[in-house]
Amino acid sequence: MALYKNELQLKGFVGQDAETKSTATDNMFTVFSLATKSSYKDKQSGEWVSHTDWHRIVCFGKSAEFAKPLKKGDYAEIKGELRSSEYDAESGDGSKNAKRRTWEVRASHVRKLERPTGDRVDSAPKGDAA
């Protein structure tokens, strides 16, 4: 039994074409955004309320190769782990540095799926990728 576990699985729509980059040591990686959507029925109004989350996906090695051809609107499944990093950012008044935390998914598995049809999906989320 593992004492710690950082594992997640996402299915959603690609928000922007995958972009391949290199590190300072010439290691290739691929980055793209993935939108996931959840909905619930508001008890007071009876209306359905939808919420879209945008995830930054970073892939290295073989998963980077699988992610490279992904295009905006593709339906994909991602498996990996959640990673955070902290950096100094200029505060609103421009005088002090403030600590900021960003989150990304470090993908170990990337798979393009057949796009759902009919009643199985509303549509790909609208809006800009984060």
Image (cartoon, rainbow, N blue to C red):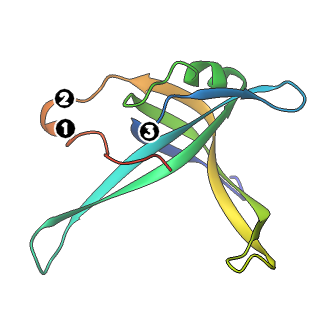
Q: Residue furthest left?
A: 46
Which residue does the image show at 72% across and 75% down from the upper left?
A: 91
Is 57 drawn above or below residue 40 in the view shown? above
Residue at 58% from the left image edge and 30% from the top image edge: 109
Q: Position of residue 17 (x, y in %)?
A: 50, 29
Do labels 1 and 2 touch, CB within 8 Å?
A: yes
Residue 41 at x, y = what percent? 17, 67
Q: Give the farthest residue toward the front.
A: 94
Amino acid found under the numbered disc labelled 3: Gly
Q: Which disc, if any, is residue 15?
A: 3
Q: Which mark is residue 76?
A: none
Q: Residues within 10 Å of mark 1 (few under 14, many from 20)?
A: few
> Residue 31 occupies which quadrant of the picture?
top right
**From mark 1 to mark 2, how far is it between C-alphas?**
6 Å
Mark in the foreground, 2 or 3: 3
Q: Is residue 5 above or below residue 67?
A: below
Q: Is residue 89 above or below residue 120?
A: below
- Above or below, 15 relative to 46: above
Disc 3/disc 1 C-alpha distance (Å): 19 Å
Apparent side of residue 50 relative to residue 20 in the rendered image (left or right): left
* Disc 2, SS: loop
Measure the C-alpha gap from mark 2 to mark 3. Answer: 19 Å
Residue type indicated by callout 1? Arg
Near mark 2 (Cα within 10 A), the count class, few <14, some 14-19 or many ≥20, is few
- In front of the other: 25 or 38: 25
Residue linked to disc 2: 117
Q: Where's residue 11, x and y in %?
A: 41, 39
The total number of labels drawn is: 3
